Image: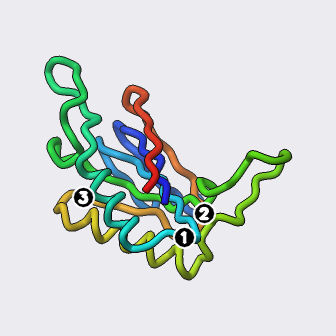
Amino acid sequence: MKALIQRVKKASVKINGESYSQIDAGLLVFLGVAKDDTVENSQKLAQKVLSLRIFEDDNEKMNFSISDIKGQILVVSQFTLCGDCKKGTRPSFDNAAAPDKAVLLYEDFIRQLEKSSLIVKTGKFRAMMDIELINDGPVTFLIEK
């Protein structure tokens, strides 16, 4: 399971040109589910996202987590994170989980984040989405569990 995390000032999802969800300051999380991922991966990754200290304190040191600042989270499914670009010029998606498995782990990841009582918004699984964001920093991390 992979999460591409971007610290944002705001982010939103549009589907078919219409607003679907949006957040203010916090994290935009693009989530990729691989075929060998489990609920344990989902739970560990959610805890990592909630506790990762990537927000600055008064001394401009990354000492605060999303939980500490009570920020918001937007989670967007992105199977292309599981793409393999090592050979040739067309990515292989053989490692991506099948949609029926991926949606269960995507939803479990979201439930784990929601336990934090932070505002958690989502994209729509398997939808073609337009994502808008203002990256804060920019600060971007790739986490794998």
The mark found on residue 126 in the picture is none
Give whichever of 116, 85 is nearer the camera: 85
- Quarter assignment of residue 20: bottom left
> Are the two marked residues, 2 and 1, in contact with CB atoms closer than 8 angstroms?
no
Expressed as whole percent of the image width and height from the top left, the position of residue 83 reads 67, 55
Does 97 sit above or below residue 113? below
Q: Amino acid at mark 1?
A: Asp
User: Disc 2 designates what residue?
Assistant: 16
Q: Residue at x 22, y 19 (%)?
A: 60
- Earlier residue among tags 1 and 3: 1
Give whichever of 128, 62 is nearer the camera: 62
Q: The C terminus appears in which quarter of the rendering?
A: bottom left
- Quarter assignment of residue 58: top left
Secondary structure under the numbered disc 3 in the rendered image = loop
User: Disc 1 designates what residue?
Assistant: 36
Secondary structure under the numbered disc 1 in the rendered image = loop
- Earlier residue among tags 2 and 1: 2
Of tags 2 and 1, the one toward the viewer is: 1
Secondary structure under the numbered disc 2 in the rendered image = loop
- Gap in angstroms between the C-alphas marked 2 and 1: 32 Å
Q: Residue at x 59, y 53 (%)?
A: 81
User: Disc 3 designates what residue?
Assistant: 119
